[in-house]
Amino acid sequence: MPTPEGRARNEEIYHTAARLMVQRGYAGTSMGDLAKAVGMTKAGLYHHISSKQDMLFQILLYAMDELEEKVIEPTGGIADPEERLREMIRLHVCGLFEHGLEFSLLFQERRHLDSDQSELIWKKVDQYLGLIRKAMRELKKQGKLRELDPDVTARHILQTITGIARWYSDDAGVSQRRLLEQTVNFNMAAILK
Amino acid sequence: MPTPEGRARNEEIYHTAARLMVQRGYAGTSMGDLAKAVGMTKAGLYHHISSKQDMLFQILLYAMDELEEKVIEPTGGIADPEERLREMIRLHVCGLFEHGLEFSLLFQERRHLDSDQSELIWKKVDQYLGLIRKAMRELKKQGKLRELDPDVTARHILQTITGIARWYSDDAGVSQRRLLEQTVNFNMAAILK
């Protein structure tokens, strides 16, 4: 269990490393580049992280932990499935803005993980998609859901959220508040009768 | 104007190069790797393409030309905006399957283009988003559109389409036909009253 200072330092390292890997690509970033960016010697960085691949894995794990803490846990107790799904989408978009678009963009490098690492990350993503599908099943029981394929629809919802990292910038001409509201409304309109 | 044989050869080169760049990342792919993958000498490849950056640019240009030819032109004459937008989404998803998910995934490397190249690709993407927004404006005049932000909504629609390349595989457990139909329906339900 890291101390609060240790945790804050880890977060800082993960964010800086993620930004660099997104900018240059995984293959274009060396451990030397990463050490320099986070203000450590290479030996110092190797004390925390065993390899570049390990760095990628630790960042993606951290991003999934954040999703758990900031989106999944706070919404788990909401009984109404419509309200729960709205809040999941809202908190996920909030998290993108607060915790960095770079984590979302880094998932495109997950092919560089080894198969065990990849499987673990994949399992966590699938658990999250499972929560979206569960809300849809409950909505269906209430007679509120359109006729749709829950697997494909959960993917589409997730792509509208994570896709924000691919096109949004401060000069995109839309406020974060409006984008939040529009993303919730777009997806709920797509699935509700 | 290339001959049909020349065109077919170019397409083959672009697809192979795109697949390799997506697999290894732009930074992780050398001109030597590209030449080997397309079965040419490095000197032979330099006869067609001046640099790795030029290769990336030519592939993205070609992908936008394909979008023009396979999606924009065939739908330009459809008077009814709802029918036109449905057909645009349908043909775009068809194009992803027929012309390769690798082109869609390669757009994530567009940060490696120089600013003139980037601006040209960006302009073409924005023209396409403009056609989606235009269909929505026409739907609004007909009183069929929900209250929504057309800029954000055009982005969300595009992300559900291009996002397919990020999660779809032959073992995804959904047929291409069903995915096509679901993607059209999801987006139309999201925007229509």
Image (cartoon, coloured by chain):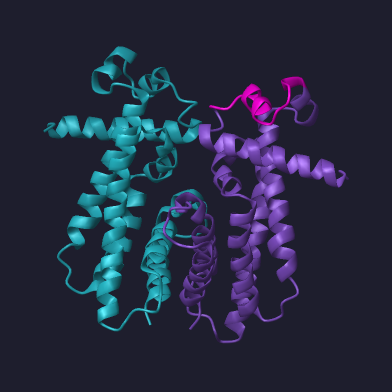
Chain colours: A purple, B cyan
Q: In the rendered image, which quarter contains the C terminus of chain B?
A: bottom left
Q: Is residue B60 visible?
A: yes
- Residue A95 in which image quadrant: bottom right
- What segment carries the magenta color? A28-43
Q: Is residue A120 visible?
A: no
Q: Residue at x 29, y 78 (%)?
A: B140
Residue A79 x %, y % = 71, 80
In the image, B155: left or right of A26? left
The stretch drawn in magenta includes residue B60? no
Decide: is B104 above or below B87. above
In the image, A143: left or right of A43? left
- Taking depth in this image into account, of A159 and A92 the one nearest to the observer is A92
Decide: is B97 above or below A113. below
Q: Residue at x 29, y 84 (%)?
A: B143
The stretch drawn in magenta includes residue A42? yes
Q: Residue at x 70, y 33 (%)?
A: A54
